Image (spheres, rainbow, N blue to C red):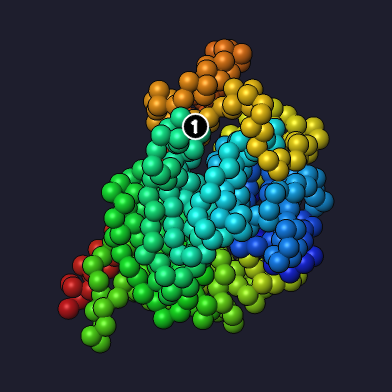
Amino acid sequence: MVVVLASSSDAGGGIGCWDLHTGSEQIRYKSLSSPCHGLTSVGDRFLASSQLRDTATSAGSVFFWSWSKPQVEVKSFPAEPITPLASNHSGTYLVGGGLSGDIYLWEVETGKLLKKWHGDNTAVTCLVFSEDDSLLISGFKNGSIRVWSLLMIFDDVRRQEASKIYEYSFSEHTLCVNDVVIGYGGYNAIIASASDDRTCKVWSLSNGMLQRNIIFPSKIKAIALDPAEHALYAGGEDGKIYIAALNTTKITTNNHVSYITGSFSNHSKAVTCLAYSAGENYLISGSDDGIVRVWNASTHNIIRVFKHAKGPITNILVLSPENDSSNHVSSNLQVASKKKGAQFPPLEKYTNSIDEDSDIKTIVSLGGSKRCMDEVSYLSSHVISSYSKELQNQGSAAASEMEIEKLKRDCQKSMQMVNQWKKMYDNLHQFCVKELLDENAK
């Protein structure tokens, strides 16, 4: 089952969950006020959401829910209000961005605050992990975007020796960064960003160069990439969803040069969030009007409409919570979730710099990719020791399980890509046949 989750910024609005195929509401999770980018899925097993009560004070919290219960099961109260949240794909780590510009990284199973670092001098507005979980991308209120390597973040020795701990720092935006998305390919992927300066910018992670600067007629609040990375969908403050081409040169119309190929709209207010469901080829949009709309990405027709009890919509997630084969949460966390729900400790407020054992118990797990295993030699000695100790304790069975899970995940991704290319081939074939028939008719 594929579900759509949407949160609201209104106090008591809750988090709605609908079946994407039937349109029926499955459950309503009780919450306070979820800010933009403040809702995330933790390993497809739990939900986590930052909650802002009053941004003028230090009040803020992070709530956790298990899928089957609408009540909050774990409440955490970080050292400062947290706005954006992001979890790596395995659900091992949860990252939060503070209003101060600090970034916090917790281990979910223990609640330990493993790392905290200063991202920039203004509030963090969005966070996203790369596909292989090796990189973290952060956007800020002052318009900057920074790319962080988790290998660097976890290695205290390298951090102390380095003049800067980020991989890239992009400062081309002049106003607040509202959204950031990343494509496939890890260090070879592209990053797209949206800003109040009415532009979307596309960078290459392979060289850190700006590839495209797309200017829109409205402030852009949310963006989404199609799976083939041919088009960028941009939700505007004017209620329109714009389509920008990523695989063509500039388009000239009426002496105006642009990458924008079209737009569609049915929202009465600003589009605040976008998500793409690749399996169904659906684009899902949320708006200040409190309505979630499901669009056919090819025809731009509305498939379904979900009405949230209260608006505006601040977050949209598209998930398959019952797909256990793609679930990579640690075994201890899975057992706890089945027996007791989301019964794990609250997130710590501060790092425990006095306890030397805290570093020894830190296991670097970046999605189980081979790239991460190959780069273990670059980690500091205490991290290497902890990783070796964990494998020894768990035995060869654990290592085999890790490899099996990795192969399952790689196979699933390969099948998704095959299906996508098949759809593209079928569409191209139909187009060519139509062109030949039209030519013969002439």
Q: Is residue 333 visible?
A: yes
Q: Is residue 68 visible?
A: no
Q: Residue at x 52, y 77 (%)?
A: 237
Report x, y in % for residue 167: 38, 45
Q: Nearer the viewer, residue 264 or 11?
A: 11
Q: Nearer the viewer, residue 81 or 367?
A: 81
Which of the image's four quarters has the C terminus? Answer: bottom left
**Left or right side of 216 for 104:** right
Report x, y in % for residue 74: 78, 44
Report x, y in % for residue 83: 63, 58
Q: Secondary structure at mark 1?
A: helix
**Left or right side of 150 for 87:** right
Question: Which corner quadrant of the image does residue 307 belong to?
Answer: bottom right
Identify the residue under disc 1.
Answer: 156
Amino acid type indicated by mark 1 = Asp
Q: Nearer the viewer, residue 130 or 424?
A: 130
Q: Residue at x 52, y 24 (%)?
A: 383
Query: Relative to 302, does residue 279 appear above or below in the rendering?
Result: above
Image label count: 1
Q: Residue at x 20, y 76 (%)?
A: 441
Q: Residue at x 53, y 31 (%)?
A: 365
Question: Which corner quadrant of the image does residue 373 belong to?
Answer: top left
Report x, y in % for residue 7: 68, 62
**Left or right side of 48 for 249:** left
Query: Relative to 263, does residue 388 appear above or below in the rendering?
Result: above
Q: Nearer the viewer, residue 148 or 248?
A: 148
Q: Pointer 1: residues within 10 angstroms few (<14), some, or many (20+)?
A: some
